Amino acid sequence: MSLGLLIWYGSKNVLLKPLDVEPGVITAFIMYINMLFRPIRELADKFNTLQMGMVGADRIFSVLDTKETTVNEGTLKPVHLNGHIQFNDVWFSYNQDTEVAEDEYALRNITFEVKAGQTVALVGATGAGKSSTINILNRFYEIQRGTVTIDGVDIKQYELGYLRSKIATVLQDVFLFSDTIFNNITLNNPNISLEEVIQAAKKVGAHEFIERLPGAYHYNVMERGATLSAGQAQLISFIRALVYKPAILVLDEATSSVDTETELMIQHAIENLMHGRTSIVIAHRLSTIQKADQIIVLDKGEIKEKGTHQELLKLNGYYKKLYELQFSSVGIAKD
């Protein structure tokens, strides 16, 4: 607007007879206007930056001001853990305040038992509470009501580092560091040898593809495994779980990001991985959990059904509806 007014006013005076304003003066004033508004624009930009900084600082201070949650560090570190898991009337909310409203509970009255060496599958829609169950078992969060025991002992009595070292979790989204395959598997644990890693890789079925890489187990992968396929990265995560010799194995959608051929290749390896270990499998694809000793159907934080694959189909309930939704489109015969 200022530039337009200047040109209008200056042009009018330039056209006057006799000449009232020189054209060079108008040109000079156009340059002066740009010089005037440049620092004003910079001040406005600095104000925006200041506002963003204030918002960021507010978030940091809110974290710093958060009251520390005292975690009961247990001391129990038995030589051997069988992996007998029991959830007894567990109520859990991510709101860790003393008073929690009824609708804020992510899990309600969760009760089930997994005997040592058995496999239990958790099934349900997104937000049903499957991952929350795993978070509780690892003591990433504390429950409000009920108890969770392993081998008959409350998990709060186990030393926290020991408890988590006995539970291996294989996630859907595998994170690989910018380092060698060997270090990504061992996580720089000096107690794990290359021979142990090779033996674990052979059990999983990943040894051949690793040997084909330049440098084999010393091949450097990029951040998040960018130089490997999703299936190869998932296989490395299985080796990582196997070398730590866990008593409890958790598979959280561990095969959902791989293609069908790779899934078939590692399915047998998964069975070997589960052998002799208590396993908890979270899966949306029901074809991967039909052999589970027990299937638990969760919905909105509550257990709706429990039983084997055949038992749940006979109930003609929530599980059967999920089963029919997944398999009716491909024409698979129902039992």
Image: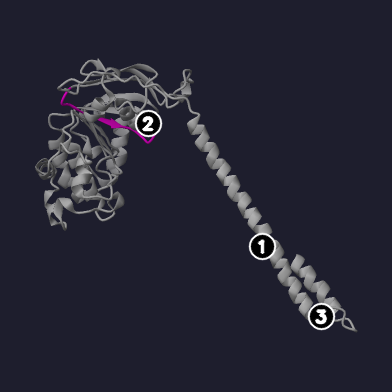
Query: Where does residue 236 sit, x and y in percent of width and height?
Result: 20, 45
Q: Amino acid at mark 3?
A: Glu
Helix, strand or loop at label 2? It is: loop
Label 1 and label 3: CA atoms lie apart by 25 Å
> Label 1: few (<14), some or many (≥20) within 10 Å?
few
Q: Camera-side residue: 105 or 71?
A: 71
Magenta stretch contains residue 256 = no
Q: Kindly identify which residue carries mark 2.
A: 128
Q: Kindly identify which residue carries mark 1.
A: 38
User: Which of pointers 2 and 1 lies earlier in the amino acid sequence?
Assistant: 1
Quadrant that contains the N terminus: bottom right
What span is in magenta?
Answer: 116-127
Helix, strand or loop at label 3? It is: loop
Q: Amino acid at mark 1?
A: Arg
In the rendered structure, the answer to whether residue 201 lies left or right of residue 87 reads left
Q: Amino acid at mark 2?
A: Ala
Q: Kindly identify which residue carries mark 3.
A: 22
In the rendered structure, the answer to whether residue 43 lies left or right of residue 254 reads right
Q: Residue furthest bottom?
A: 18
Query: Where does residue 31 sit, x and y in percent of width and height?
Result: 71, 71
